[in-house]
Amino acid sequence: MTDIFADDLVVLDFETTGLSPDNGDRAIEIGAVRLRKGQPVETFQALMNPGRRVNSFIEQYTGITNTMLADAAPNGEVMEAFWQFLGDDNLLAHNASFDKKFLDSEFSLINRDYRGQFACSLLTSRRVFSEAPNHRLGTLVSYKNLNESGDFHRALFDAQMTAKLWVSLLEEVRTNLAIDDIDFDLMQCISKASKRDWQLKARRFLS
């Protein structure tokens, strides 16, 4: 195990023009929260202009309009600033495979990379909160009574809610495993375990 703890990371969320950068989709907003010992200490949020108009569905889904994007900085400028913000931290996202694809794509366009690894609160919640009605972010926020005022499908709010969910997941893991400090690698191990034996696999990891 490493000594990198699961409550020290950057929580990331993108709003985008579509589902996949492989189809030419681009990020239009980024939001991020830096956690230190499970507490939010810093945030990053910016709209970004992808150089083309977004369709009406995305405008309605996110509330981000073409008028708003027309005044935003271009993607490369925003992503360069985020690269500086991120540093060497690990990352967390809800449905991390989606956000990782866009982070990789946007960074590749400005010849930047990152050292951190991704954790996924969606996969982890399926193991640790298996009794939840479903594992969409909004459902889990309500299920764990984490509600705050704000708009889902805006990047910073989603990142803030994901951060709260992650802290709740860590608390549940601490209780179940009777441990204080939770290694980042342990949470990755749990996210890959089966729903029935995540505690057994976690204890084997710790032994």
Image (spheres, rainbow, N blue to C red):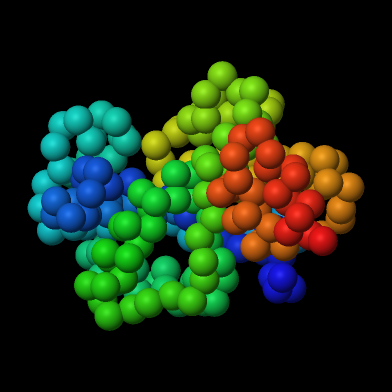
- Identified at 23% across, 35% down, the residue is 59
Q: Nearer the viewer, residue 51 or 203?
A: 203
Question: Picture coordinates of residue 2 (x, y %)?
Answer: 70, 73
Q: Which of 92 and 160 is in front in this view?
A: 92
Residue 159, visible in the rendered structure: no
Position of residue 104 relative to residue 147, above or below, is: below
56 horizontally vs 113: left or right: left
Position of residue 174 relative to residue 142, above or below, is: below
Position of residue 31 relative to residue 74, above or below, is: above
Question: Picture coordinates of residue 57 (x, y %)?
Answer: 19, 30
Question: Picture coordinates of residue 32 (x, y %)?
Answer: 50, 56
Question: Picture coordinates of residue 96 (x, y %)?
Answer: 44, 50
Quadrant housing the N terminus: bottom right
- Identified at 82% across, 61% down, the residue is 207
Quarter of the figure with residue 84? bottom left
- Identified at 73% across, 51% down, the residue is 202
Quarter of the figure with residue 22? bottom left
- Identified at 44% across, 44% down, the residue is 95
Residue 175, visible in the rendered structure: yes
58 horizontally vs 89: left or right: left
Count all numbered tags in the image, as a single digit.
0
Q: Residue reaching furthest bottom?
A: 111
Q: Nearer the viewer, residue 157 or 205?
A: 205
